Amino acid sequence: EAGVTQFPSHSVIEKGQTVTLRCDPISGHDNLYWYRRVMGKEIKFLLHFVKESKQDESGMPNNRFLAERTGGTYSTLKVQPAELEDSGVYFCASSRGGSLARYTFGSGTRLTVV
Amino acid sequence: AQSVTQLGSHVSVSEGALVLLRCNYSSSVPPYLFWYVQYPNQGLQLLLKYTTGATLVKGINGFEAEFKKSETSFHLTKPSAHMSDAAEYFCAVSEGNFGNEKLTFGTGTRLTIIP
């Protein structure tokens, strides 16, 4: 089975610009999660989709971040406008419902805001 | 609220020596516990997990961890380090609520293997 795919793998943008990250989960995985790791710190939960619905978005840092999951398939995370503190690695993960131990992570997108 | 503490952001061991990476957690309910590894330029890979049952859990690449409820610990060990073990390791906890399986991670431990 194909894994969780994220792209781009790297993105360098200027402060104030917009960036959109994409995550393609494993086919059939209803649950999709976004996490972020700011340099040197812990990996932090951002939000959780069940199919196309946001189940939990308690980790979203502010309203410059917008996540969508079209038709319950792939998901996008848009940052607009980007700030320096948004730099970090953004991870996506997916799982089947109720199978916590079968989380699968993508390779992440490294975002650098300059 | 749950939390994870990993003692030591950097650990160095000689090739062939014991690897011990420490993880303590707090959780209001019986936890599900995980260790993930991230090799350079790769994503997070599950090493092992504890959900219920046997408290000594064996994972991939010769790693194992023991859940100790009285000590709220889930330390990761490997008897003999190999050069290929050089990576960053993350301990994580989840309360395992059905339908809300978000993970809370520690800050990570970077393991260096000395030849």
Image (cartoon, rainbow, N blue to C red):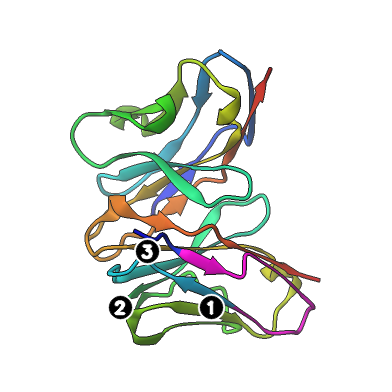
Q: Nearer the viewer, residue B67 or A101?
A: A101
Q: Is B2 above or below relative to A3?
A: above
Residue for point 32% across, 60% down: B101
Residues tagged by mark 3 and mark 1 found on one chain of the structure: yes
At label 2, counting other C-alpha atoms closer than 10 Å, the crowd grade (few under 14, some 14-19, many 20 or more) is: some
Q: Alpha carbon of mark 1 to alpha carbon of mark 2: how far?
A: 15 Å
Q: Is B114 above or below relative to B46?
A: above
Residue A85 shows which numbered tag?
A: none
Residues tagged by mark 3 and mark 2 found on one chain of the structure: yes
Q: Is residue A18 magenta?
A: yes
Name the kind of residue labelled 2 in the image.
Answer: Lys
Residue A94 shows which numbered tag?
A: 3
Q: Earlier in the sequence, mark 3 or mark 1?
A: 1
Instruction: Find residue A106 and report its horizontal and vertical position in percent.
Output: 48, 59
Q: Secondary structure at mark 2?
A: loop
Disc 1 designates what residue?
A: A77
The magenta segment is A5-20
Name the quadrant containing residue A103. bottom left
Q: Horizontally, is B26 left or right of B54 in the view?
A: right
Name the kind of residue labelled 3 in the image.
Answer: Ser
Residue for point 39% across, 51% down: B2
The reply to whether residue B31 is in sight is: yes
Q: Mark 3 near mark 2, Cβ–Cβ under 8 Å? A: no
Q: Secondary structure at mark 1?
A: strand
At label 3, counting other C-alpha atoms closer than 10 Å, the crowd grade (few under 14, some 14-19, many 20 or more) is: many
Residue for point 43% across, 29% down: B61
**Chain ID of residue with mark 2:** A
Disc 2 designates what residue?
A: A51
Quick one: which residue is furthest to the left in this view?
B53
**Chain ID of residue with mark 1:** A
